[in-house]
Image (cartoon, rainbow, N blue to C red):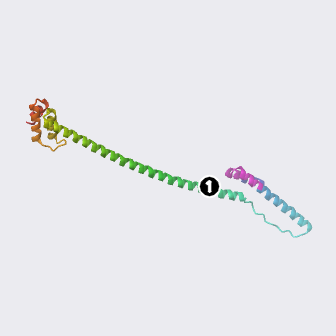
Amino acid sequence: MKLKAIMVMMLACAAAYGSSTARLISEKVHAREMQRQMIGIRHELEMQRGEPVLVKKVSSPIPEELERRRLDEEQFWQRIVEMQRIADERAQIVEARRQEALAQLRIQQEKESVRHIKEAERVQQAVLDFQRERARKGAPSAQRDMGKRYLAGDGVAKDEQEARRLLGLAAAQGDGEARSILTQLQ
Protein backbone atom coordinates (compact mmCIF):
# COMPACT_ATOMS: atom_id res chain seq x y z
CA MET A 1 0.00 0.00 0.00
CA LYS A 2 2.81 2.38 0.86
CA LEU A 3 4.44 1.69 -2.47
CA LYS A 4 1.27 2.62 -4.36
CA ALA A 5 0.96 5.86 -2.38
CA ILE A 6 4.60 6.67 -3.10
CA MET A 7 4.11 5.96 -6.81
CA VAL A 8 1.00 8.17 -6.95
CA MET A 9 2.91 10.93 -5.17
CA MET A 10 5.80 10.57 -7.62
CA LEU A 11 3.47 10.74 -10.64
CA ALA A 12 1.73 13.80 -9.21
CA CYS A 13 5.06 15.51 -8.59
CA ALA A 14 6.28 14.57 -12.05
CA ALA A 15 3.17 16.14 -13.56
CA ALA A 16 3.37 19.25 -11.36
CA TYR A 17 7.12 19.88 -11.21
CA GLY A 18 8.69 17.85 -13.98
CA SER A 19 10.49 14.53 -14.13
CA SER A 20 13.71 15.79 -12.48
CA THR A 21 11.76 16.66 -9.33
CA ALA A 22 10.01 13.29 -9.40
CA ARG A 23 13.44 11.60 -9.66
CA LEU A 24 14.66 13.58 -6.63
CA ILE A 25 11.54 12.59 -4.69
CA SER A 26 12.03 8.98 -5.69
CA GLU A 27 15.62 9.06 -4.45
CA LYS A 28 14.59 10.66 -1.16
CA VAL A 29 11.76 8.17 -0.68
CA HIS A 30 14.15 5.31 -1.40
CA ALA A 31 16.63 6.74 1.11
CA ARG A 32 13.87 7.01 3.75
CA GLU A 33 12.77 3.45 3.10
CA MET A 34 16.36 2.28 3.47
CA GLN A 35 16.58 4.25 6.73
CA ARG A 36 13.37 2.61 8.01
CA GLN A 37 14.69 -0.83 7.07
CA MET A 38 17.96 -0.10 8.91
CA ILE A 39 15.97 1.00 11.97
CA GLY A 40 13.91 -2.18 11.70
CA ILE A 41 17.03 -4.36 11.53
CA ARG A 42 18.58 -2.51 14.49
CA HIS A 43 15.31 -2.91 16.38
CA GLU A 44 15.35 -6.68 15.77
CA LEU A 45 19.00 -6.95 16.90
CA GLU A 46 18.28 -4.98 20.05
CA MET A 47 15.33 -7.27 20.83
CA GLN A 48 17.49 -10.37 20.30
CA ARG A 49 20.10 -9.02 22.70
CA GLY A 50 17.47 -8.10 25.23
CA GLU A 51 18.30 -4.44 25.11
CA PRO A 52 15.58 -1.81 25.47
CA VAL A 53 14.26 -0.74 22.12
CA LEU A 54 14.19 2.96 21.41
CA VAL A 55 11.70 3.67 18.69
CA LYS A 56 12.73 6.63 16.62
CA LYS A 57 9.91 8.25 14.76
CA VAL A 58 10.86 8.87 11.15
CA SER A 59 9.15 11.92 9.77
CA SER A 60 7.39 11.73 6.46
CA PRO A 61 9.57 12.92 3.64
CA ILE A 62 9.18 16.59 2.69
CA PRO A 63 12.03 17.04 0.26
CA GLU A 64 13.98 20.24 0.46
CA GLU A 65 13.96 20.24 -3.30
CA LEU A 66 10.16 20.57 -3.30
CA GLU A 67 10.40 23.54 -0.97
CA ARG A 68 13.13 25.09 -3.12
CA ARG A 69 11.00 24.56 -6.23
CA ARG A 70 7.99 26.13 -4.50
CA LEU A 71 10.11 29.16 -3.57
CA ASP A 72 11.52 29.30 -7.11
CA GLU A 73 7.99 29.20 -8.48
CA GLU A 74 6.92 32.04 -6.15
CA GLN A 75 9.94 34.07 -7.24
CA PHE A 76 9.13 33.27 -10.86
CA TRP A 77 5.57 34.58 -10.51
CA GLN A 78 6.81 37.59 -8.57
CA ARG A 79 9.18 38.31 -11.46
CA ILE A 80 6.32 37.86 -13.95
CA VAL A 81 4.18 40.32 -11.96
CA GLU A 82 7.10 42.76 -11.76
CA MET A 83 7.78 42.41 -15.49
CA GLN A 84 4.09 43.02 -16.21
CA ARG A 85 4.18 46.13 -14.00
CA ILE A 86 7.26 47.38 -15.85
CA ALA A 87 5.62 46.62 -19.21
CA ASP A 88 2.50 48.52 -18.12
CA GLU A 89 4.62 51.48 -17.03
CA ARG A 90 6.46 51.45 -20.35
CA ALA A 91 3.16 51.24 -22.21
CA GLN A 92 1.95 54.27 -20.26
CA ILE A 93 5.15 56.14 -21.11
CA VAL A 94 4.81 55.21 -24.78
CA GLU A 95 1.15 56.31 -24.77
CA ALA A 96 2.09 59.59 -23.08
CA ARG A 97 4.80 60.18 -25.68
CA ARG A 98 2.34 59.33 -28.47
CA GLN A 99 -0.19 61.79 -27.05
CA GLU A 100 2.54 64.42 -26.74
CA ALA A 101 3.62 63.81 -30.35
CA LEU A 102 0.01 64.10 -31.50
CA ALA A 103 -0.37 67.35 -29.58
CA GLN A 104 2.84 68.67 -31.15
CA LEU A 105 1.57 67.61 -34.57
CA ARG A 106 -1.75 69.41 -33.97
CA ILE A 107 0.11 72.54 -32.87
CA GLN A 108 2.33 72.33 -35.96
CA GLN A 109 -0.74 71.83 -38.19
CA GLU A 110 -2.46 74.82 -36.57
CA LYS A 111 0.64 76.94 -37.15
CA GLU A 112 0.74 75.79 -40.77
CA SER A 113 -2.97 76.50 -41.12
CA VAL A 114 -2.55 79.98 -39.68
CA ARG A 115 0.42 80.54 -41.98
CA HIS A 116 -1.65 79.40 -44.99
CA ILE A 117 -4.56 81.61 -43.95
CA LYS A 118 -2.24 84.60 -43.57
CA GLU A 119 -0.66 83.80 -46.93
CA ALA A 120 -4.12 83.55 -48.53
CA GLU A 121 -5.12 86.88 -46.96
CA ARG A 122 -1.90 88.45 -48.21
CA VAL A 123 -2.57 87.11 -51.73
CA GLN A 124 -6.18 88.33 -51.61
CA GLN A 125 -5.00 91.76 -50.48
CA ALA A 126 -2.43 91.82 -53.30
CA VAL A 127 -5.16 90.91 -55.82
CA LEU A 128 -7.45 93.60 -54.37
CA ASP A 129 -4.65 96.20 -54.53
CA PHE A 130 -3.87 95.15 -58.12
CA GLN A 131 -7.57 95.43 -59.14
CA ARG A 132 -7.89 98.84 -57.45
CA GLU A 133 -4.85 100.12 -59.27
CA ARG A 134 -6.09 98.78 -62.63
CA ALA A 135 -9.58 100.21 -61.95
CA ARG A 136 -8.01 103.61 -61.12
CA LYS A 137 -6.10 103.46 -64.42
CA GLY A 138 -9.38 102.79 -66.28
CA ALA A 139 -9.34 99.02 -67.09
CA PRO A 140 -13.04 98.08 -67.62
CA SER A 141 -12.68 94.47 -66.32
CA ALA A 142 -11.02 95.75 -63.12
CA GLN A 143 -13.71 98.45 -62.72
CA ARG A 144 -16.42 95.79 -63.16
CA ASP A 145 -14.72 93.39 -60.67
CA MET A 146 -14.25 96.17 -58.09
CA GLY A 147 -17.90 97.19 -58.56
CA LYS A 148 -18.98 93.59 -57.85
CA ARG A 149 -16.73 93.57 -54.77
CA TYR A 150 -18.33 96.75 -53.42
CA LEU A 151 -21.80 95.30 -54.03
CA ALA A 152 -20.99 92.09 -52.12
CA GLY A 153 -18.62 93.56 -49.54
CA ASP A 154 -15.92 91.15 -50.74
CA GLY A 155 -12.60 92.37 -49.28
CA VAL A 156 -13.97 95.92 -49.03
CA ALA A 157 -16.73 97.64 -47.08
CA LYS A 158 -20.12 97.20 -48.76
CA ASP A 159 -20.85 100.43 -50.68
CA GLU A 160 -23.58 100.38 -53.34
CA GLN A 161 -22.87 103.97 -54.45
CA GLU A 162 -19.18 103.20 -55.20
CA ALA A 163 -20.27 99.93 -56.88
CA ARG A 164 -22.66 101.84 -59.21
CA ARG A 165 -19.96 104.40 -60.03
CA LEU A 166 -17.36 101.71 -60.96
CA LEU A 167 -19.90 99.58 -62.88
CA GLY A 168 -21.03 102.73 -64.74
CA LEU A 169 -17.41 103.48 -65.77
CA ALA A 170 -16.97 99.88 -67.02
CA ALA A 171 -20.33 99.93 -68.88
CA ALA A 172 -19.39 103.25 -70.52
CA GLN A 173 -16.30 101.51 -71.95
CA GLY A 174 -18.47 98.72 -73.42
CA ASP A 175 -18.39 96.03 -70.68
CA GLY A 176 -21.63 94.01 -71.19
CA GLU A 177 -21.55 92.30 -67.79
CA ALA A 178 -21.25 95.66 -66.02
CA ARG A 179 -24.24 96.96 -68.05
CA SER A 180 -26.27 93.84 -67.09
CA ILE A 181 -25.49 94.28 -63.37
CA LEU A 182 -26.44 97.97 -63.49
CA THR A 183 -29.75 97.07 -65.21
CA GLN A 184 -30.53 94.58 -62.40
CA LEU A 185 -29.74 97.21 -59.74
CA GLN A 186 -32.35 99.65 -61.16
- Seen in the picture, residue 95 relative to 127 is either above or below; the reply is below
Asked if residue 124 lies left or right of residue 168, the reply is: right
Residue at the extreme bottom of the image, as rendered: 52
Residue beneath the point at 72% across and 59% down = 64
Residue beneath the point at 62% across and 57% down = 75
Judge whether residue 170 is colored magenta.
no
Write down the region rendered in magenta. 10-27
Residue beneath the point at 30% across and 45% down = 115
The quadrant in which the C terminus is found is top left
The quadrant in which the N terminus is found is bottom right
- Seen in the picture, residue 33 relative to 107 is either above or below; the reply is below
- Seen in the picture, residue 101 relative to 167 is either above or below; the reply is below
Image quarter for residue 162? top left
Image quarter for residue 164? top left
- Percent position (x, y) of residue 112? 33, 45
Q: Main secondary structure of the magenta part?
A: helix
Q: Name the amino acid, label 1.
A: Phe
Asked if residue 100 lies left or right of residue 38, the reply is: left
Q: Foreground residue, 127 or 23?
A: 127
Judge whether residue 16 is colored magenta.
yes
Element type where label 1 sits in the image: helix
Residue under label 1: 76
Q: Foreground residue, 181 or 39?
A: 181
Q: Foreground residue, 57 or 1?
A: 57
Residue at the extreme front of the image, as rendered: 137
